[in-house]
């Protein structure tokens, strides 16, 4: 629900900033917010128990950060350039090389940043894939809607932000309901159902035209995507032991960032004719691509997600 509230606040604040001082302030506003959080954290977080001195794997941290940054750069460049261009291929190739060096380093260092074998564990792999697809769907949908409403329908940034509010409200409600659904239906059913709902919203956007149809399609799709995000975290963390929860959380959040870049790159390529000409050409194709991805993941989710229910968060043990 906090994510939905943040989504709504971000949509409106983004519209206000773009309509006022300019879109660059969407990035500048992160500075005071980040500094405020940094100052508040020591007072809000409990002090960690003494566990002895542990060496920080700085080379591993630098390698995995550079690899992920190169991957996202290549995907972002693919959104408005040809996939065969050097600005796309070189960062993507560089990310593969850097990830390979990271794996080699983690296998040989005495205090690795992470045990790379965790990526092969079914809960973490399934949760990470769910997170990647769900984030690609969510950001792809919002990206297309923003371009469509402003460049095709010629609405202001503020009006566009206001029209995204129903989707944001739907995400808050969906997140709250997902907790109850998981307790009764299990992760497999909730994830598959959410993906089917996301596919329905995307398909509606593909076959309709107009701002209010856009609001309806976004709201339906958002209502389906958010439970998948919850299921992704639940799968990755609810089935792993406590000592692996931190690493599993880091892996899932990395896939969250990569998924957003992939979603925007794919829909930008599919909708390129309309984006360039400021028409609706290509937008239906992009929405159908998102719907197909959601349907495919809905079919795979019951197979990939471990059986049973993740009823205890990582670190909670039965008595």
Image (cartoon, rainbow, N blue to C red):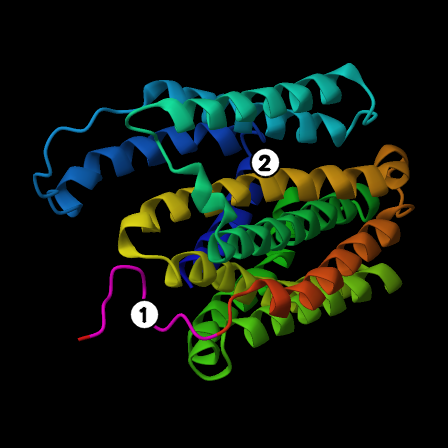
The local secondary structure at tag 1 comes to: loop
Q: Quadrant of residue 162?
A: bottom right
Q: Locate residue 228, reporting x and y percent.
A: 56, 63
* Residue beneath the point at 68% across and 31% down: 75
Report the residue that reaches farthest toward the left: 50
Answer whether residue 61 is visible to the viewer in this image: no
Query: Relative to residue 316, is residue 24 drawn left or right?
Result: right
The quarter of the rendered structure image containing the C terminus is bottom left
Q: Residue furthest front?
A: 108
In this figure, which residue is indicated by the disc labeled 2? 18
174 or 136, which is in the foreground? 136
Left or right of 105 in this view: 88: right
Say if the magenta span includes residue 314: yes
Query: Which is nearer the N-term, disc 1 or disc 2?
Result: 2
In this view, the residue in front, 4 or 237, is 237
Camera-side residue of 4 and 120: 120
The part of the chain drawn in magenta is: 308-318
- Indicate whether 271 appears above or below 75: below
Q: Residue at x 51, y 72 (%)?
A: 307
Q: Which residue is mark 1?
A: 312
Location of residue 124 with respect to 90 vertically, above or below: below
Q: How busy is the neighbourhood of tag 1: few (under 14 within 10 Å), some, or many (20 plus)?
A: few
At horizontal 73% and vertical 22% (from top left) the residue drawn is 88
Q: Residue 122 location in percent, x, y? A: 51, 56
């Amino acid at each position: 629900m906090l994510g939905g509230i943040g989504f709504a606040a971000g949509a409106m604040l983004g519209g206000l900033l773009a309509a006022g001082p300019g879109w660059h302030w969407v990035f500048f506003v992160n500075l005071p917010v980040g500094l405020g959080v940094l100052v508040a954290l020591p007072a809000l977080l409990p002090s960690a128990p003494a566990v002895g001195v542990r060496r920080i794997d700085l080379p591993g941290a630098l390698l995995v950060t550079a690899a992920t940054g190169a991957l996202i750069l290549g995907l972002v460049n693919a959104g408005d350039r040809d996939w065969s261009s050097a600005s796309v291929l070189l960062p993507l190739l560089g990310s593969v090389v850097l990830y390979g060096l990271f794996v080699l380093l983690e296998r040989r260092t005495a205090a690795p940043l992470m045990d790379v074998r965790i990526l092969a564990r079914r809960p973490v792999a399934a949760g990470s894939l769910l997170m990647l697809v769900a984030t690609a769907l969510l950001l792809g949908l919002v990206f297309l809607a923003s371009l469509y409403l402003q460049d095709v329908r010629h609405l202001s940034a503020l009006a566009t932000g206001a029209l995204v509010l129903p989707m944001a409200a739907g995400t808050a409600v969906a997140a709250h309901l997902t907790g109850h659904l998981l307790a009764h239906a299990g992760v497999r059913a909730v994830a598959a159902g959410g993906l089917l709902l996301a596919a329905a919203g995307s398909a509606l956007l593909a076959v309709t035209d107009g701002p209010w149809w856009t609001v309806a399609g976004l709201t339906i799709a958002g209502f389906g995507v958010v439970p998948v995000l919850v299921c992704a975290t639940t799968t990755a963390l609810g089935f792993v032991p406590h000592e692996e929860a931190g690493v599993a959380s880091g892996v899932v959040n990395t896939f969250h960032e990569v998924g957003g870049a992939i979603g925007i790159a794919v829909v930008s390529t599919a909708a390129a004719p309309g984006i360039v000409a400021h028409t609706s050409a290509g937008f239906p194709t992009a929405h159908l691509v998102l719907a197909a991805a959601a349907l495919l993941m809905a079919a795979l989710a019951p197979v990939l997600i471990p059986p049973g229910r993740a009823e205890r968060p990582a670190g909670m043990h039965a008595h």
